[in-house]
Image: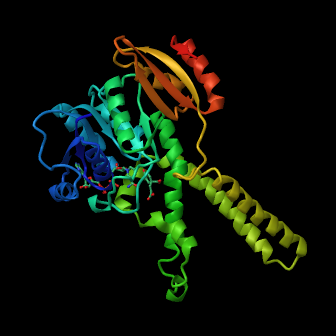
């Protein structure tokens, strides 16, 4: 990739632009607020001058509610060879674009699983995405060219590509991002009218639980409006657990020893389940290196091949954790190495064979 256009130069757009600029890519910066683009340029993220012709990759990093409109304008204007967005929700923007009847083969929906509670270019850092998952949601219609450009961007940002279906992504982030965001806000909201004497005692525990509650509400209303069902289901489950925990705590206040024991068991249960969930949270750099199994697929060097493999893997219910592509020099063929969880490898191999792919051992 030689050139890129970042549209929306806030936290995420400027962070990606800084990473690309450091790798020698010529980055053009645009924002509906020109001051934001100027600030990003002053930080060394690129130039706020418009490109003279189409760039290799357009990266749309505007708030979710604006993503489809901005992408549609960019696609109609022929601003780039490939187009991606980085919005925190993937199903809604894609459906909005589909209703506009545009050719979406040059578009790929993506989502870096990294961010901050602060907005704007001044909060950006070139290493924001390092070691973090970056979700790619290709469909069978996605051109290989845009997939390759997106993989290059992810690699320049030091992130780890994860391929998923858009709706599966939205259900997953409801669990690991959207519901936790609301829970953090609910905990922080208890402090709004609390006594100063209590607030003064805040230690690291409450700081950890409430950091993300400082995020921009306008951005989060956009995100939650595009994923309300899955988030409401999960919050309903949390509410049921809360009710049970309140009952257990009330039982602990009882004069009856049996009731107190029941209460203690109820509280212990929620704490134990919390421990079991917490150990599953992967560390950024600190987690043990994961050992994936590699499924190698032979592809013809034709447009759309990679996207079709990813879509077939998605249909088989397999997440691709990482991907590498080896182009055979002088031949119209290449080898795609798909890294998956060991238990998923046999299912992926069988599903891809069934769909006519040549698997190499
Ligand atoms: N903040 C996070 O933690 C995080 C993480 C991953 C992905 N995202 C996604 O990245 C995108 C950007 O989020 P952010 O945190 O960088 O927000 P931000 O508020 O820091 O930046 C958004 C930028 O987009 C600009 N903008 C708004 N409407 C526009 C339009 N119509 N055309 C051009 N520019 C426009 C704003 O002026 C602003 O500079 C969002 O879609 C968000 O869902 C955010
Ligand atoms: O670390 C934070 O501040 C974040 O909230 C980042 C976070 C997340 O939930 O992990 C928030 C929204 C994005 O879509 C992706 C990442």
Instruction: Pick whichever, 253 or 110, lies toward us.
Output: 110
On screen, 97 above or below 170? above
Instruction: Pick whichever, 112 or 67, lies toward us.
Output: 112
Q: In the picture, which quadrant includes the C terminus?
A: top right
- Residue at 54%, 50% in the rendered image: 176
The answer to whether any part of residue 143 appears in the image is no
Residue 52 image point, x, y percent: 10, 37
On screen, 36 above or below 346? below
Residue 169 image point, x, y percent: 49, 40
Residue 180 image point, x, y percent: 53, 57
Q: In the picture, which quadrant includes the N terminus?
A: top left
Please tell me in which quadrant of the rendered image residue 345 appears: top right
The answer to whether any part of residue 301 appears in the image is yes
On screen, 168 above or below 47? above
- Residue at 74%, 59% in the rendered image: 272
- Residue at 76%, 60% in the rendered image: 269
Instruction: Pick whichever, 165 or 253, lies toward us.
Output: 165
Q: Is residue 289 left or right of residue 213?
A: right
How many numbered marks are there? 0
Q: Is residue 127 left or right of residue 210?
A: left
On screen, 283 above or below 267? above
Q: Is residue 143 left or right of residue 252?
A: left
Instruction: Pick whichever, 166 or 43, lies toward us.
Output: 43
Hey, which residue is sitting farthest bottom in the picture?
197
Residue 336 image point, x, y percent: 46, 22
Q: Ligand 2 is found in which quarter of the picture?
A: bottom left
Q: Is residue 210 left or right of residue 148?
A: right
Please tell me in which quadrant of the rendered image residue 243 appears: bottom right
- Residue at 24%, 45% in the rendered image: 6
Hey, which residue is sitting farthest front in the picture?
329
């Amino acid at each position: 990739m030689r050139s890129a256009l970042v549209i929306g130069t806030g936290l995420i757009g400027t962070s990606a632009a800084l990473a690309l600029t450091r790798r020698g890519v010529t980055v053009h910066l645009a924002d509906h607020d020109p001051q934001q683009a100027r600030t990003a340029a002053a930080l060394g993220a690129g130039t706020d001058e418009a490109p003279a012709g189409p760039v290799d990759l357009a990266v749309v990093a505007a708030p979710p509610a604006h993503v489809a409109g901005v992408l549609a304008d960019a696609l109609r204007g022929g601003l780039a060879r490939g187009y991606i967005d980085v919005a925190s929700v993937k199903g809604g923007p894609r459906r909005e674009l589909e209703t506009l009847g545009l050719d979406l083969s040059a578009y790929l929906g993506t989502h870096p699983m990294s961010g901050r509670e602060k907005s704007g270019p001044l909060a950006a850092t070139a290493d924001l995405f390092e070691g973090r998952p970056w979700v790619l949601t290709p469909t069978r219609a996605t051109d290989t060219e845009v997939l390759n450009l997106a993989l290059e961007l992810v690699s320049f940002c030091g992130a780890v590509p994860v391929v998923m279906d858009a709706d599966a992504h939205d259900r997953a982030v409801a669990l690991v991002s959207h519901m936790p965001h609301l829970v953090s806000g609910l905990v922080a909201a208890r402090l709004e009218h609390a006594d100063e004497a209590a607030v003064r005692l805040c230690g690291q525990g409450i700081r950890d639980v409430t950091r993300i509650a400082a995020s921009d509400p306008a951005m989060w209303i956009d995100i939650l409006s595009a994923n309300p069902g899955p988030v409401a289901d999960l919050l309903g489950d949390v509410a049921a657990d809360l009710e049970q925990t309140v009952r257990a705590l009330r039982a602990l206040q009882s004069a009856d020893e049996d009731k107190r024991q029941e209460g203690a068991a109820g509280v212990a249960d929620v704490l134990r389940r919390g421990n079991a969930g917490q150990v599953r949270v992967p560390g950024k750099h600190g987690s043990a290196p994961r050992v994936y199994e590699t499924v190698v697929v032979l592809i013809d060097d034709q447009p759309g091949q990679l996207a079709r493999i990813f879509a077939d893997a998605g249909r088989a219910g397999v997440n691709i954790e990482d991907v590498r592509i080896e182009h055979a020099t002088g031949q119209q063929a290449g080898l795609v190495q798909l890294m998956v969880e060991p238990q998923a490898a046999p299912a992926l191999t069988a599903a891809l064979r069934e769909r006519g792919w040549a698997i190499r051992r």
